[in-house]
Amino acid sequence: MNLLLDTHALIWFLDGNEKDLSQKAKSLILDNANKSFISIATL
Protein backbone atom coordinates (compact mmCIF):
# COMPACT_ATOMS: atom_id res chain seq x y z
CA MET A 1 0.00 0.00 0.00
CA ASN A 2 1.21 3.51 -0.76
CA LEU A 3 0.83 6.02 2.08
CA LEU A 4 0.97 9.79 1.66
CA LEU A 5 1.70 11.37 5.03
CA ASP A 6 0.58 14.92 5.66
CA THR A 7 2.69 17.27 7.77
CA HIS A 8 0.87 16.48 11.01
CA ALA A 9 1.07 12.72 10.58
CA LEU A 10 4.80 12.94 9.87
CA ILE A 11 5.48 15.14 12.91
CA TRP A 12 3.35 12.93 15.17
CA PHE A 13 5.10 9.81 13.89
CA LEU A 14 8.58 11.26 14.36
CA ASP A 15 7.65 12.65 17.79
CA GLY A 16 6.42 9.24 18.93
CA ASN A 17 3.45 10.72 20.80
CA GLU A 18 0.85 7.94 20.75
CA LYS A 19 -2.06 10.16 21.77
CA ASP A 20 -1.84 12.10 18.48
CA LEU A 21 -1.25 9.22 16.03
CA SER A 22 -3.33 6.07 16.25
CA GLN A 23 -1.66 2.71 16.75
CA LYS A 24 -3.12 1.54 13.43
CA ALA A 25 -1.57 4.49 11.56
CA LYS A 26 1.78 3.90 13.25
CA SER A 27 1.74 0.20 12.36
CA LEU A 28 0.89 0.99 8.72
CA ILE A 29 3.83 3.43 8.51
CA LEU A 30 6.21 0.89 10.09
CA ASP A 31 5.07 -2.00 7.89
CA ASN A 32 7.82 -2.68 5.34
CA ALA A 33 5.22 -3.92 2.87
CA ASN A 34 3.96 -0.32 2.59
CA LYS A 35 5.69 2.65 0.97
CA SER A 36 5.41 5.98 2.78
CA PHE A 37 5.67 9.26 0.90
CA ILE A 38 5.66 12.89 1.98
CA SER A 39 4.94 15.93 -0.11
CA ILE A 40 7.79 18.25 -1.03
CA ALA A 41 5.66 20.99 0.56
CA THR A 42 6.07 19.22 3.92
CA LEU A 43 9.83 19.70 3.78
Image: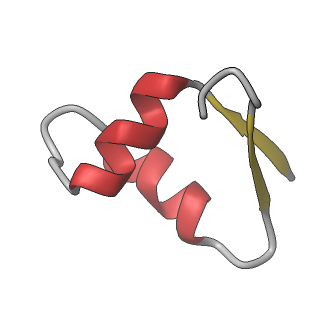
Q: Residue at x 86, y 53 (%)?
A: 1
Q: Quadrant of residue 39?
A: top right
Q: Residue furthest right?
A: 1
Question: Looking at the image, which residue sits at the far bottom?
Answer: 32
Q: From where the camera sits, is residue 22 visible?
A: no
Asked whether, in this view, residue 34 is left or right of residue 17, the answer is right
Residue 35: percent from left, percent from top: 81, 60
Instruction: Give me the residue at 41% from left, 25% from top.
Output: 8
Residue 37: image location, x then y, percent: 77, 46
In the rendered structure, the answer to whether residue 33 lies left or right of residue 25 reads: right
Residue occupying image coordinates x 36% and y 39% = 11
Locate residue 24, reporting x and y percent: 44, 49
Residue 19 lies, in percent from the top left, at: 13, 37
Number of callouts in the render?
A: 0
| Residue depicted at 58% across the width and 25% down the height | 6
Res. 16 in view: yes
